[in-house]
Amino acid sequence: MWLLKRYVACFVWFSFLHLITTSVTHYSIPEEMEEGSVVANLATDLSLDVKTLSKRKMRLDLIANRKYLDVNKETGELYVVDKIDREYLCIKMLTSCYLRMEVTLEDPLRIFNIELEILDINDNAPQFRRDAIYLDISESTPTGERFSLSNAVDPDVGSNSLKTYHLSESDKFTIDIQTRGDGSKFADLILKKPLDREQHAVHNLILTAVDGGTPARSGTASIIVRVLDTNDNSPTFDKAVYNVKIMENSPIGSLVIHLNATDLDEGSNSDISYSYSLYTSEKTQQSFNLNYVTGEITVKGMLNYEDFRIYDMEVIATDKGANSLSGQCTIKILVEDMNDNHPEISIKSFQSPVNENIELDTVIAVVSVSDTDSGDNGVVDLHIPDNMPFKLRESSDNYYELVVSEPLDREKVPEYDITFTVTDRGSPPLSDNETRTLELLDVNDNVPQFPQSFYTIRVIENNAPGALLSSVTAFDPDLYENQYLVYFIVEKEIANTSMSMLFSINPENGNLYALKTFDYEIEKEFLFHIEARDSGSPPLSSNITVHIIIVDQNDNAPVIVSPWRAHGSVVEEKIPRSTDKGSLVAKVIALDTDSVHNSRITYQFLQVTDATLFSLDQYNGEIRTMRMFSYRDPRHQRLVVVAKDNGEPALSATVTIKLSTVETAVKAYSDMTEVPLEYDIFSDLNLYLVIGLGSVSFLLLITILVTIVLKCQKPKPSKAAPPCRNSVISERNSTIADSTLVSNDAYWYSLFLAETRKGKLVVRQPVPKGSRYIVSSIPRGTGQTETSDSAASTLQV
C-alpha cells in the first residue's frame, strides 16, 4: 500500500514538471571570452515578453561550482560574468565540454533547460614533465641504438593538441616519433654515428614539442648526453727519445728528469704507472731510481765522469684499464765533467808601508796563480776590486805585478785592503782569494786650513785686559809633527804701535786675547793677519785676516758747553720785558763723545716756573718765548734743562738758567743792529779769570809748538788713520743753529750768537777744560741737516 502511494506521488510530480518545462536550448561559445560578452538573447529565443521578465522574477541557475553566466532582466540577454577556462572546467573531458543551466520564471511557473557548449581554443603550449633529460651512453655503443625520452603533454584537444616533435641539429643523433593507443605521441632518441669521448664528452640537444593550433605553440626540453669512457687510448710520452745531461758527483736524490706520459682516457683508464723495460741494464738501474707513480728519475748512486759517461734506459708507461694499454720511451743520460778543483793563489812579495807620494807604476806586489783542472776548468783569471788606485800587470805565464796606477793620498784613504781574487773558467766557476793591507806613510803635503779666510770680531770698549776675544783654529789633515800647528800674529804697526802690544794669541790653540782696554772714542777698529804654521819639514803655513771692531758703550755723559756756568751750575741771564713772542731767550748746547747712536742728544725742561711762557726745542736746545710777558708774570724765572743722550741706559747733564726781566733792553743787545760785534763781555769776571786766561793761552802755545815738532817727525799718515787727540770732529748728525765751537786741550771758547731785534751779538764765554771737540758752524734752517764732510772751520783765539 505504501509503495502504491509513493508511485502515485512521483507520477503526479513528473506530470507537473512536464507541464512547466520545455525542451533543452543549445548554445556554444569559445573559452576565454571576455567578461560582459553576450552569449544569446533568451527572451527572443524562448519567446518571452521582455517587459514581464522582472515582474516574473526571472533567474538563472547554473549546475556548477562557480557562476560563470547571468541574465539581464531588462533585455533578456545571457552574458558572461566570469572568464571560462575549458581545461579547468572540463578537466576530465577530452572531447566535448558542456555547461548546463536552468532559467526559471514565476506567475506562471516555467523552467527552461539551457545547455552551453564550451569550445576549445589553442591557449596552452605543450610541456615536458622535466626541463632536462640526462642520458649516459658508452662511447662503444653501436649505431642504431634507441633511447626512450619523456613525452610532452598539451591540455588542449582536437587539432590544438600535441602534433609532433623536433630535434636540434646533430650529426650523432636523430629521433623517431610514435603514437600510442590513447592517441598520445612520444619520441625515441636514435644513435646515428659512433661516439668518441676523447673528442666530444658531452652532447647538448634540444627536443621541441609542437601542437596543431593556429598559430602553433611549442615547448622544449634539454637532452644532455654524457659519453662514458672505454679504455681505447694507450699512454704516450712527449718524446720518443730524451737526451739528459747531468754533472758528476751530483748528490743522491738529485732529479735527472721528470717523465710525463698522458692518456686521453679518464678514471682508471688514465691512471699510469712507470717501469724499466728488460732492455735497461743492471748498472743503469743501480745508478738511477725510477718512481713508478710520478715518473721521476733521480740519482741513486755516485756518478763519476771518469768511470762511466753515458747511461741508456727504456721506460714503459702502462694504464690501469680492464684491458691495459702501454707506451714506451728511450732516455740517454750524459755525465758531464765537474769543476771540482779550486784555483790557488800565492803572493810572492808585498811591500807595505809606502809613502803616500809614491811614484806611479811602482811595483807593490808579485802574485802567482794556478789550477790543477784541465780545459776551461783549468784556465784562471786574477783581479782586484774596482775603484782602487792599483792595477794588475801580467809579467809572465800565471805571474802578475801589482803597480800604482793613480796618485795616493793618505788624508783621503789611510790604508787599502787589497783582495786578490783568482777565478777559473769552469761551470760553475771556482775561486779563491787572499787579502793584504797596504799602509800609507804621511808626507807633509797639506797646508793648515782655517774654516774661513776673514774673521770679524766685535769687542765692546772698556774691556778687561787679557780678556778672550775669540778662537781662530786651523786644521791640518797630516799626521804627527806635520799636524802640529803654531799660531802667531803677523807684525804690523799702526801709529807706532805694534799689534803684538795690543793683542796676544796662544800659539797652541789659537785663542786671541786683548792686552789693553780699548776706548771707542780713540780707536775704532784694527786690521791684522794671523798665521798658522805646521811643524813639518819644510813647514807649510796659511794666514787669515782679522778685523777687530771696537763697539761703543755709553760711557760718556753729555757735557753742556753753552751757556757757560761761571759759578756753580746756575746761569743768570737778563731779558727785556718787552720781548716779542718767539724770540730766542737762550740756547743750550751739549756735546757727547760717544758714537753716533749714543751721542744723539735731546733736550727737555726738568723744571720751569711757567710752562706757558717758554718752549724748548728738543733737538737744537733753543729756548724761545711762547708769548709776551704780562704784568702778572714774576720778574724772575727759573728754567732747569736736562740734556739726555740716546744710550742704554741714557746719561744726562743739567743746567739751571735764572732769567730776570728788565724794563729796558740790555745795552749789549740794543746797540748792535747790522754788523755782529765782537766785544768781550766780562761782566762778573774777576781778576782770577784774567790771570787764568793768560796762563791757559801760554800753555796752549807751548802745546801747539810741541805738536808741530812731533808731526814733522811722523811718517805721512794714511787716509784711514784716526784723527789726532787735538783735532777730533764730532760725528753726530745733529742741527746746531748759528753757533761755532772751537777747542784745544787748554781752553774752550763758545761763541754764542744771540738774536735780538736789532741784530746779532757774538758772546765769548769760557768752556770746561779737557773737552776735545770742534763743531763746525752750521746755519740754522727750518729742518734737520747733516754735518758736512769737509774739515771743521777753526777760530783763532
Image (cartoon, grey):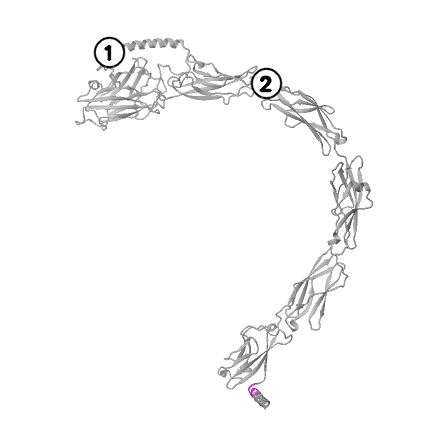
Magenta portion: prevailing SS class? helix
The residue carrying pointer 1 sits among few (fewer than 14), some (14 to 19) or many (20 or more) residues within 10 Å by Cα, namely: few
> Dots 2 and 1: beta carbons under 8 Å?
no
The residue carrying pointer 2 sits among few (fewer than 14), some (14 to 19) or many (20 or more) residues within 10 Å by Cα, namely: some
**Closer to us: 707 or 191:** 191
Q: Is residue 528 visible?
A: yes
Q: Position of residue 657 (x, y in %)?
A: 24, 21
Q: Is residue 171 visible?
A: no
The answer to whether 291 is drawn above or below residue 572 in the figure is below
How much space separates mark 2 and mark 1, taking CA atoms?
A: 81 Å
| Quadrant housing residue 314 | top right
User: Helix, strand or loop at disc 2?
Assistant: loop
Between disc 2 and disc 1, whose residue precedes?
2
Q: Amino acid at mark 2?
A: Val
User: Helix, strand or loop at disc 1?
Assistant: helix
Question: In the drawing, what numbered circle is on residue 688?
Answer: 1
**Closer to us: 524 or 364:** 364
Instruction: Tell me: 661 left or right of 365.
Output: left
Q: Is residue 19 magenta?
A: yes
Q: Position of residue 246 (x, y in %)?
A: 75, 38
Report the magenta residues as a range.
Answer: 16-21
Residue tagged by mark 2? Answer: 443
Q: Quadrant of the N terminus?
A: bottom right
| Quadrant housing residue 727 | top left
